[in-house]
Amino acid sequence: MNQDAIRDAKKLGLPKMLILGLQHMFAMFGATILVPILVNSYFVDACGEGLTQGLTVSVTLFCAGFGTLFFHVCSKMKVPAFLGSSFAFLGGFSTVAHLDAGMYAAMGANEKAAYACGGVVVAGLLYLILALVIKLVGVKRVMRFLPPVVTGPVIICIGLSLASSAIGNASTNWFLALVALAVIIVFNIWGKGMFRIIPILMGVVISYVVAVIMNAVGMTNPDGSAILSFASVAEAGWVGLPPFQFCKFDITAILVMAPIAIATMMEHVGDMSAISATVGENFLADPGLHRTLMGDGLATALAGLVGGPANTTYGENTGVLELSKVYDPLVIRIAAVFAIIVSFIPKVSSVISTMPASIIGGVSFMLYGMISAIGVRNIVENKVDLTKSRNLIIAGVIFVCGLGFSNGITFTVGGTSITLTALAIAAIAGIVLNIILPGNDYEFGVNEKGDEYRGIHQ
């Protein structure tokens, strides 16, 4: 246990506590607000219109702050974790945005987003099922069905399935995209202290400043369009309610989004292991993995209910814990309150929404690649033996299903058209093969380092 750690932040005084809270908010800020920006770009591409309700920056920040506070209540106020937007669901939002059969054929962007959020609600509720099973039979028995040979390739597929989206956005202005990518790499490798923890935020800020300068001197995108437009910023007010949108439910959208919970639940296990290792307390035992899963799942379901993205425990904030050595969960709750306050300032959301697609593309280059690379790390850290035919078969089938079924599989049950997406097919195939093929020797908790690195942080 770290002797220099501060476990009661009150003794630092209120001003320092507020500054530490702000630091946590900024650590999650860049990645969290990127999710609604990316999702909006999918709907613009598919529907020719962006989102005006739900999945906006302000709704996302509210859901992150409220979800974090809710998580702390569920975990007995003991776990210093911040819940931000999950990148794992980006592929699902992209798929729903591009659905064009049946009732989705003439559907607008906001309504499609509402159905996607309905799928997020169901995904969040799946956490409760796993939490109950873990409570009843124990974590080791449950994790035997979700070994790294299944979760690793599924995470790799999530990142690779989004690769074309990154190229599409970056191609609108390759110079700005490369500036964003270069800045992220520089801060990630050579950054010091806090700057090393927020490379994505720095990439967005610095490339945006470059875009402002280019726009000011009269430069345009290669296709002749303006690099930036501030019309929406002038119209936005200083104070206003986030534009919440109640979700809608449809079996096709649910089957697109819900299976992604398999990957994010494994992410949660990894993050809880990492936070436990950082703080020096076993949170998997107290308050218990079932409680933290329940908090994460309910926070995700509540976010989807009001038009927000799925929540997930954030690796960036674990990095801040390591940096600051202040382990008091109260500081995280202060950050959550700050996020809620910012969500009620529309002017901030409007400035963020002016982000050029090329910058989004440049950031996505790193982001989507890192998701796949984390899947590879998941396999390596857990010492998955790919010389075994059993493991090769499972990984191979997951890859082909996850990347080959580009349009999924559509079938009709009781007059209802149902679509299973590539990721859903891959996850189901991997789990089933892992159950029926002999030789499953994975045991959760034996390799602590491997268990720490199971997540898609950012």
Image (cartoon, helix red, strand yellow):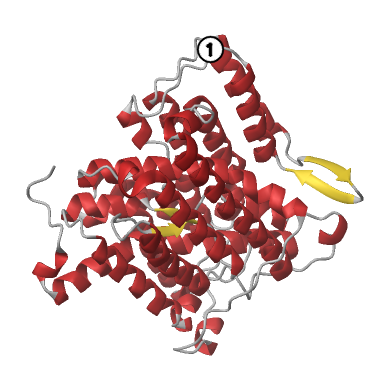
Name which residue lies at 49% across and 15% down. Answer: 386
* Residue 348 placement, left or right of 276: right
Work out whether residue 261 can be spotted: yes
Residue 79: x, y in percent?
30, 54
Q: Which one is in front, 339 or 204?
A: 339
Residue position marked by numbered label 1 in the rendering: 439
Furthest residue in direction right, as rendered: 415
Can you say whether 260 is above or below 55 in the image?
above
Can you say whether 444 is above or below 288 in the image?
above
Furthest residue in direction front, as rendered: 136
Q: Which one is in front, 200 or 454?
A: 454
Residue 343: x, y in percent?
44, 77
* Residue 102 placement, left or right of 13: right
Residue 299: x, y in percent?
49, 61
Q: Which one is in front, 157 or 439?
A: 439
Work out whether residue 192 can be spotted: no
Quadrant of residue 282 within the rendered picture: top left
Q: Residues within 10 Å of mark 1 (few under 14, many from 20)?
A: few
Quadrant of residue 376 within the rendered picture: top left
Residue 37: x, y in percent?
54, 64
Numbered marks: total: 1
Name which residue lies at 32% across and 42% down. Answer: 285
Can you say whether 46 is above or below 405 in the image?
below
The three-letter code of the residue at mark 1 reads: Gly
SS category of the residue bearing label 1: loop
Name which residue lies at 43% across and 72% down. Answer: 212
